[in-house]
Image (cartoon, coloured by chain):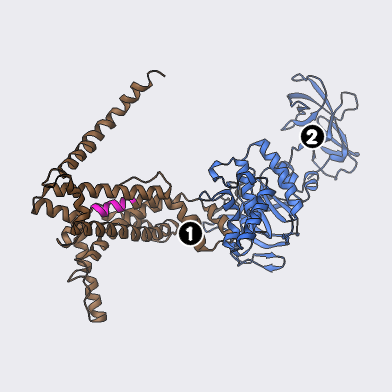
Amino acid sequence: MTEGFKPIAITLENCGKTFADGTRALHPLTLEIAASETIVFLGPSGCGKTTTLRIIAGLETPDPGGRVLFDGEDVTALPIERRRVGMVFQSYALFPNMSVAENVGYGLRVRRVAGAEAAGRVAEMLAMMRIEALADRRIDQLSGGQRQRVALARALAVRPRVLLMDEPLTALDAKLRDALRLEIDELLRRLGITAIYVTHDQAEAMALGDRIVVMDHGRVAQVGKPRDIYQRPSTRFVADFIGTMNRINGTVRDGAFVTAAGAIPWREAPPGASEALFRPEDVTLDDTAEAHLRGRLTAAFFLGDRTRLFIDVGMEKPLVTETGARRDFTHDEPIGLRIDPRGLMAL
Amino acid sequence: MRHETPRLILLLLPAGIFFTAFFLLPLSRLFAIGGSGADGFAAYAAIVTDRNYFASLLSTLALAAATTAATLVISGISGVFLQRSRFPGNAILVAMLTFPLAFPGVVIGFMVIMLAGRQGLIGEIALRLTGEKIVFAYSMAGLFMGYVYFSVPRTILTVMAAAEKLDPKLEEAARSLGASTWQVVRDVIIPGLKPAFISAGAICFATAVGAFGTAFTLATRINVLPMVIYTEFTLQANIATAAALSFVLGAVTWVVLAAARTAAGSSVAAAG
Ligand SMILES: Nc1ncnc2c1ncn2[C@@H]1O[C@H](COP(=O)(O)OP(=O)(O)OP(=O)(O)O)[C@@H](O)[C@H]1O
Ligand SMILES: [Mg+2]
């Protein structure tokens, strides 16, 4: 089922985009995407993710000086219809005047793939997305999840060189989103296709991306594997945008980070650091005399398998941690915290 | 729930009265008059059996169909273009399009004569270029030109409104799948504009079938059904035949529009 896909490497060279009205949507960006890699563009609304995707697709041309290469071949001047890319949109963009099977077969029809071969390919795609039973349905008779399956089948039917997805799951409800995300992940690995995925949902980005490109105001903030980006964010923006980040002010003294709420042992502390950052999972509750930090509970959210705690330590924002402790928490109760030094960072 | 039916009847009353007073009664009266002549209801058969009537029915329908087709092609192309391109003067041009909407048929006819009449612009230019004067204002061709001129502006406005609602993502999806510009037009834009084409086309067709003023201005001998009806009614005082022809004209138009609507599988169009 996976034969016929020839993944390509993609290179963006100094691809910037200034729109006619002067909007600087994208500052010149250079990026190498390996064949078969899944790259996720992640960032808040308006940061330029869609613009980047559209430049790769051929729907926008980069500002002069920018180049897009597919396997080394310069495709910058090639319009989208000659780039052989698969596109999946948030709004599905299925043809309402065609049935499911006709939608899936459309790319083959316009490329004049012979009838029998096209029919076989359509059947194969419908089977792959498990929508054989819907083949003759009209588009308005489908649920959102089914529509997105059709859109994926349609995009993949022409054996694209790269699959481009712009927030394909955003319009779906949470449960369906999780299920389809898993399915897309399996599909991309099985086909080995080069894939570019745009989202503003960091959980989605972490789950799908071989690498994540975090974007902010038209610039790349950081590129890296999900784990690197989570554990070693290179800017405050990335630290805040991905996951939850605790921050506390203090000074480095004698192998410890001394704050108003207590001292955290931190041997590798960069000298002169005035702020320590750490993730909720690096914090444990500790009511003994050895606790690093002391504060008071401001809120506790019971989430079923765990409880999310907000602890005031006299900083601008309360520290956040989660605990599996089987007990009730009361407002304003004193809380002692221990911080795993391996999770400490300074920026 | 039990009070639903009386309430429904009450709510339907205004529409019912209107429908009866202005549609059902006059139409049945018209139908009755059509059968009140010397030949009785056989007058209705005359539209088929009388070669003159039948020919004018056919030419009327052909003229309306040609007008509709030409109008849709011209308006479809220019409507989409005007909606998508921003150029200086765009807004003024679109505003000017509504200008001919208020013209009576006489004025349209007058303009056709100025353009393609004996002293018309087209004739003058042709004379300079080829040494031969082209005059077609006083014929079916002149009528066709006048009707197209009258129908294009409003159809463009309808097309523009519909083109604005087309989802650009559909075109992008089609192109990503390899569709050429022409294939995008055929598979995405035209299907997307179909409801607008049907409703605008229906109005265009019905207007062209029933229009009278332009034909009257251009020539009294143009063989279209409204002219025939006028002649029968005022000149021959043949009221029964005029009524029968009118009724058939309405009915045929209605059938054509209903058929077009069914064929297009849409419930959007207004049947004339
Ligand atoms: N055709 C256009 N003309 C002018 N400005 C545009 C155009 N398209 C996008 N922009 C602007 O460029 C910036 C980046 O837009 P883009 O669509 O790439 O953002 P995004 O990251 O995809 O956001 P979102 O998550 O909301 O989809 C925004 O400020 C947007 O307003
Ligand atoms: Mg976007």
User: Is the residue marked by circle 2 packed among few (<14), some (14-19), or many (20+) residues within 10 Å?
Assistant: many
Q: CA distance from mark 1 to mark 2?
A: 56 Å
| Residue A3 x/y as whole percent | 74, 59
Q: Nearer the viewer, residue A179 or A233?
A: A179
Residue at the spot 20% in from the left edge and 55% down from the top edge? B49
Q: Amino acid at mark 2?
A: Pro
SS type, badge 1:
helix
Per the image, the residue denoted by label 2 is A280
| Residue B134 x/y as whole percent | 23, 74
The boundaries of the magenta stretch are: B202-210
Q: Quadrant of the N terminus of chain B?
A: top left
| Chain A, hue in figure | blue
Main SS, magenta residues: helix
Instruction: Reply yes or no: does residue B203 show up in magenta.
Output: yes
Q: Nearer the viewer, residue A345 or B109?
A: B109
Q: Which chain is brown?
A: B
**Do marks 1 and 2 share a chain?**
no
Q: Amino acid at mark 1?
A: Arg
Residue at the spot 74% in from the left edge and 20% down from the top edge? A331
SS type, badge 2:
helix
* Eye-nearest disc, 1 or 2: 1
Q: Which mark is residue B186?
A: 1
A242 versus B144 height, above or below? above
